[in-house]
Image (cartoon, coloured by chain):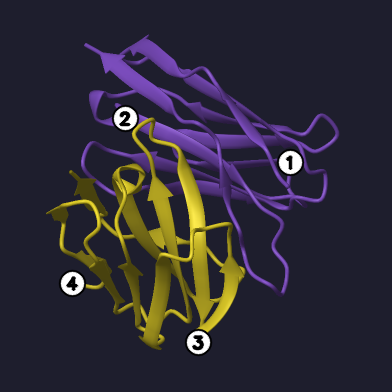
Chain colours: A yellow, B purple
Amino acid sequence: DTAVSQTPKYLVTQMGNDKSIKCEQNLGHDTMYWYKQDSKKFLKIMFSYNNKELIINETVPNRFSPKSPDKAHLNLHINSLELGDSAVYFCASSLGRADTQYFGPGTRLTVL
Amino acid sequence: GENVEQHPSTLSVQEGDSAVIKCTYSDSASNYFPWYKQELGKGPQLIIDIRSNVGEKKDQRIAVTLNKTAKHFSLHITETQPEDSAVYFCAASLITGGGNKLTFGTGTQLKVEL
């Protein structure tokens, strides 16, 4: 199936741990994004990459580091996890910088 | 930066009735306004979008209107069906060469009752 996919779907971990979430799209898109959805369902952009180049970087703690090995993948690594990092993280992609964004199914991160 | 307000936060309608969700935005330069539907446990799915050079757009039972002067835009769903039940998000952005940074509203939980 053509889509934006994320792994894992659920992630439960202890405070202080380091974890990664992977995102892949097979839509042939050039631009990818990470969004965070908090417990009140508020969606906020974190990062955007275009052809492996960082183009949007919102005010996000340095503990969050996106990595784009190629334009079909955008991974999110989080160091020293905190309780407040608990949220659903969505990856999205778009054909170009100005095009419609398509979202993945989300990764629910729970920090205990 | 952009700020988007969305109302109502919850909306309950009878099957077959119409539903209207309204959003206002703060940045008059914003030029792109998508609407997303999010079902439980899933990612947001684009249902319709409009750009600032258009005042209205329709796709079957769904329509969006944009009033640039008042800085507000609305989603209209006619002949609602139970499968329309979901959370709906509006968003606004200024599309530039630097990218498309969507600012989302706070969402509307729509419930279509039989």
Q: Which amino acid does label 3 sit on?
A: Asn
Q: Residue A1 carries which label?
A: 4
Could you say which quadrant of the image residue B84 lies in? top left
Q: Residue A51 carries which label?
A: 3
CA gap, disc 3 to disc 4? 22 Å
In percent of width and height, residue A9 lies at 16, 57
What element does badge 3 sit on? Answer: loop
What element does badge 1 sit on? Answer: loop
What element does badge 4 sit on? Answer: loop
Q: Which amino acid does label 4 sit on?
A: Asp
Residue that numbered label 1 is attached to: B55
Q: Pointers 4 and 2 in contact (CB under 8 A)?
A: no
In percent of width and height, residue B83 lies at 24, 30
Above or below: residue A48 compared with residue B70: below
Q: What residue type is labelled 2?
A: Asp
The answer to whether residue B17 shows anywhere in this view is no
Above or below: residue A7 compared with residue A11: below
> What quarter of the picture does the N terminus of chain A occupy?
bottom left
Above or below: residue B82 compared with residue A1: above
